[in-house]
Amino acid sequence: MATSAAALLVLSLAGCTPTPVPPDQPSPTTQAPSATAPASSPPSATDSEPAAGAVQIAAVGDMNGPKTSKRSSPSGRNGAAITQLVQDDEIDAFLGLGDFQYDTAYCADYVKYWTKLWGGTMPKLYWVSAPNHDWEPDRNEDLDNFMNGQCPGSTAKAAINDQRGFLANGKPYSKDFGNWHFAFLSSAHWRYDPQAAQASTKWLDKDLAAAQAAGKHLAVVYHKPYFTSNTDSHERAADHKPWIDVMWKHRVRLTLSASQHNYERSCPISNTDKCVKDGMTAFQVSTGGIGLRSFTSKPSYIKKRFSDTHGFLRMTLHDDGSFDWKFIPTSGTSTDAGTRSAPL
């Protein structure tokens, strides 16, 4: 069970012994930041100093609405809060979970709208492309050029492009953060090129196997969620099942996705939708700024969800495989927080 250094210090000074939080359960003491703070002063995204050696990430998808550039908008408030974390060096990575700019985004849209509200996140940005809004072959194919600083009017590169160079839309890649190994996949392949999707499945199997053999804790990032409630617009991405089977094979600890325009967290789950101790904790975080959607079903494996609040997820990943999470509301009041203990 991971407890932050600051929390231990406070408890020690009070002469108390910390009460363990059950694995994958919300913390009873977490308070939501104010949702009424002015747009120029985004809510604080941290309550205490991170533990030494821990990896700090922020994550969200479904970010910027059509022609959205107001800093007082939900998109603007999220972009400002995450940008502040980047500028203050409080996170090691910002994971962009797809659907960066609506509706059909080209270079000019990314530069004129997304950059105005989210451009400050680029130095820490690791991205995946989503189908349709981010990337559709022979239609809108500018996201990879934008992330590599090749769109007229924007030369900034995303962190992964600064490190690796040009990454074509849909190309899988992986990155180690401390003792954690993250694989990044494009859901667009399942819609546009099933053969490429199968190739990415084989890549994922080899990539996770090598990281597992090296003693890393595993996480996977992709856009369209498999473990999710239905909405009027989307159901689970059932075609992603081959990825899920590979993740289960290698006992991935954490998955991050988006797409649904709401927030969800699962129990630690198997590839057969069973809550199990060694399963994946699946977070679906699509609250970046686009309009929110209500749920139309309630799978038993979903342990926390809401569709009334924009914000983003903050996580602390510890070397032993435990992790802490907190949803930071920026427009609304719903939140979620807790800890998952290290694997046995």
Image: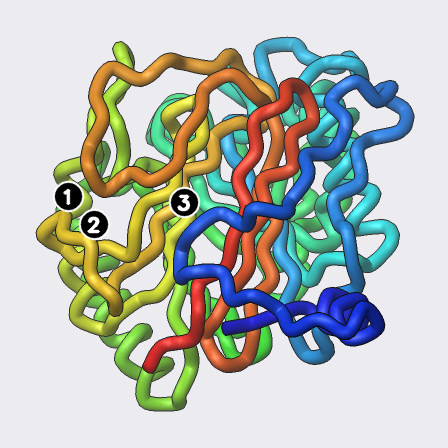
Q: Is residue 126 above or below residue 299?
A: below
Instruction: Tell which of 146 and 103 is nearer to you.
Output: 103
Three-letter amino acid code at the position of disc 3 = Phe
What label does residue 194 carry, if any? 1
Q: Nearer the viewer, mark 3 or mark 1?
A: 3
**Label 3: which residue?**
283
- Circle nearer the N terminus (2, 3): 2
- The three-letter amino acid code for the residue at tag 2 is Ala
Residue at 40% in and 61% down: 23
Q: CA distance from mark 2 to mark 1?
A: 5 Å
Q: Nearer the viewer, residue 12 or 201?
A: 12
Instruction: Identify the residue at image location x=54%, y=50%.
Output: 27
Which percent across, then down, holds residue 131? Answer: 35, 31
Residue 274 in the image, given as x and y percentages of width and height: 14, 52
From the image, tell me which residue sits under label 2: 197
Label 2 Cα crowd, 10 Å radius (few <14 / some 14-19 / many 20+) = many
Residue 162 location, x and y as percent? 68, 60
In the rendered structure, which amino acid carries the disc numbered 1? Answer: Pro
Q: Are marks 2 and 1 in contact (CB under 8 Å)?
A: yes
147 shown above or below 162: above
**20 shown above or below 336:** below
Lower position in the chain sequence, tag 3 or tag 1: 1
